[in-house]
Image (spheres, rainbow, N blue to C red):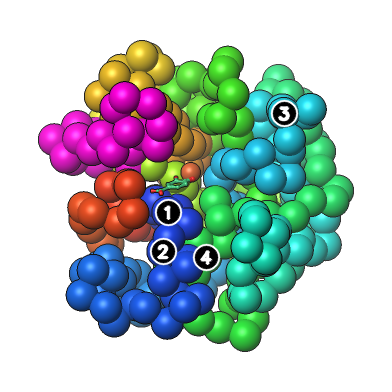
Amino acid sequence: MARITASVYTSHVPAIGAAMDLGKTQEPYWQKVFAGYEPSRQWMKENTPDVVFLVYNDHATAFSLDFIPTFAIGTAAGYKVADEGWGPRPVPDVEGHPELAAHIAQSVIQQDFDLTIVNNMDVDHGLTVPLSLMCGDTPRWPVKVIPFAVNVVQYPVPSGMRCFKLGQAIRKAVESYDGDLNVQIWGTGGMSHQLQGPRAGLINRDWDNAFLDRLIADPEGLAGVPHIDYVREAGSEGIELVMWLIARGAMADVAGGPAPTLRHRFYHVPASNTAVGHLILENNQ
Ligand code: DHB
Ligand code: FE
């Protein structure tokens, strides 16, 4: 069967991608950010899965305001890197896993979650920046990717609890796949940031670190936090953090298994307008 071996959580700040693409990673401002991902890149080399189920948000790139799916699963064989206004990032296109994606769609929809099936889309910084952070500069991504896009841009957005329960359904789906695959699930976006309005630039270190603590040790309690708390405490774009609960809900302990091992934890401010947070949790099974 397929199994989820680990979950990864990371911010997706577009300027991090630009720093890599423009050769600025050794500048003092960026060096501190990338130093925090050195252990992660090493870990990724040693623990390369077959497939990454990558939970992210599209920033009105593939989905304009004409169509806003709450949850969308990519079932394509491949995905092009989106042009977000400055030309596509000079990173490899993304290879999909249509068989596993179609199986997960089937299983999760039958578990009563409504997913939009996407056979053709480009992927934006929400997906490519986490890949760049974890895999570095590479001519080819070392993993296949199932993009899973969540609407956290246009209200109403899904609750943390719905995301957490969806993660549990995804775990069941992966484990019922008839094929031996090592799968990681990544939750991306966040941490605290607000990009517009009078509170633009808001960062909340205490709240972010409490979120990381609870994501590790009390994910179900954290899933009960309402939207208004994210927006008030972590800024309007801090709501991206609900996506981390999808990945956390897919871990073994939530289904009665042993607690995960914390492999890496990193937090850094500033990176563009955003607090960068990052965790790696490994399943013990
Ligand atoms: C920034 C952060 C984001 O999450 C995003 O989608 C766009 C910009 C920023 O920090 O500038
Ligand atoms: Fe974002």
Q: Mark 3 highlights which residue?
A: 65
Could you classify mark 1 by the number of other residues whose Cα lies within 10 Å: few (under 14), some (14-19), or many (20 or more)? many
Label 1 lies in ligand 1 vicinity (Cβ under 8 Å):
yes
Query: Does residue 156 lie above or below 207 as drawn?
Result: above
Disc 2 designates what residue?
16
Write the start and end of the magenta stretch as one range: 191-215
Label located before the other in sequence (3 or 4) = 3
| C-alpha span from label 1 to label 2 | 6 Å
CA gap between label 2 and label 4 equals: 11 Å
Q: Residue at x 47, y 57 (%)?
A: 14
Whether residue 134 is visible: no
- Given residues 210 and 15, the one toward you in this image is 15
Could you say where residue 168 lies in the image, as x and y percent from the top left?
53, 33
From the image, tell me which residue sits under label 4.
131
Identity, as a three-letter code, of the amino acid under mark 2? Ile
Closer to the camera in the image, 114 or 123: 123
Determine whether the beta carbon of the residue marked 3 sits less than 8 angstroms from the nearest atom of ligand 1: no
- Mark 1 in CB contact with mark 2 (< 8 angstroms): yes
